[in-house]
Amino acid sequence: QVQFVESGGGLVQPGASLRLSCAASGFTLDYHAIAWFRQAPGKERGAVSCINTSEDTWYDNSVKGRFTISRDDAKNTVYLQMNNLKPDDTGVYSCASSCLGRSQDIWGQGTQVTVSS
């Protein structure tokens, strides 16, 4: 089955760190840009970060300087290191098989991140 499996979410206090993982199953990441998306409660899903096959990266302004995306094609996995987390970072984080997040892309089920004191 072709899918992503995300993990690493949780409930943390402001200022804490988490590392999310996005493991591909049933296909290889080598030829895909991979993006992390976030859907906050009551809001539309939006792109947080993306990494292409040349390891060029893009970040939403809200996470620049705090989040780092990386990929390990040998492990077929993309990571999102999230530091200095804020309550506004709360949401379900999902990965997609392109930076555009199209309906025809491969998506994961997501992992919940809650930042609260």
Image (tube, rainbow, N blue to C red):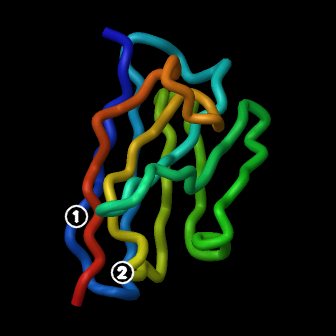
Which mark sits nearer the N-terminus, 1 or 2? 1
* x 56%, y 37%: residue: 72
Figure quadrant of residue 53: top right
Q: Which residue is mark 1?
A: 10
Instruction: Return the residue nearer the eye: 24 or 113.
Output: 113
Q: Position of residue 109 (x, y in %)?
A: 28, 35
Q: Position of residue 26 (x, y in %)?
A: 39, 11
Instruction: Return the residue nearer the eye: 110 or 12.
Output: 110
* x 49%, y 55%: residue: 80
Kindly report which numbered mark, 1 or 2, lies closer to the viewer in this rendering.
2
Q: On residue 87, which mark appears?
A: 2
- Name the amino acid type tagged 1: Gly
Q: Within 10 angstroms of label 2, few (less than 14), some, or many (20 or more) residues?
A: some
Q: Position of residue 111 (x, y in %)?
A: 28, 49
Figure quadrant of residue 62: bottom right
Badge 2 marks a residue whose secondary structure is: helix
User: Which corner quadrant holds the C terminus?
Assistant: bottom left
For residue 42, above or below residue 31: below
Q: Is residue 11 left or right of residue 49?
A: left
Q: CA distance from mark 1 to mark 2?
A: 13 Å
- Name the amino acid type tagged 2: Pro
Q: Position of residue 106 (x, y in %)?
A: 46, 22
For residue 64, above or below residue 53: below
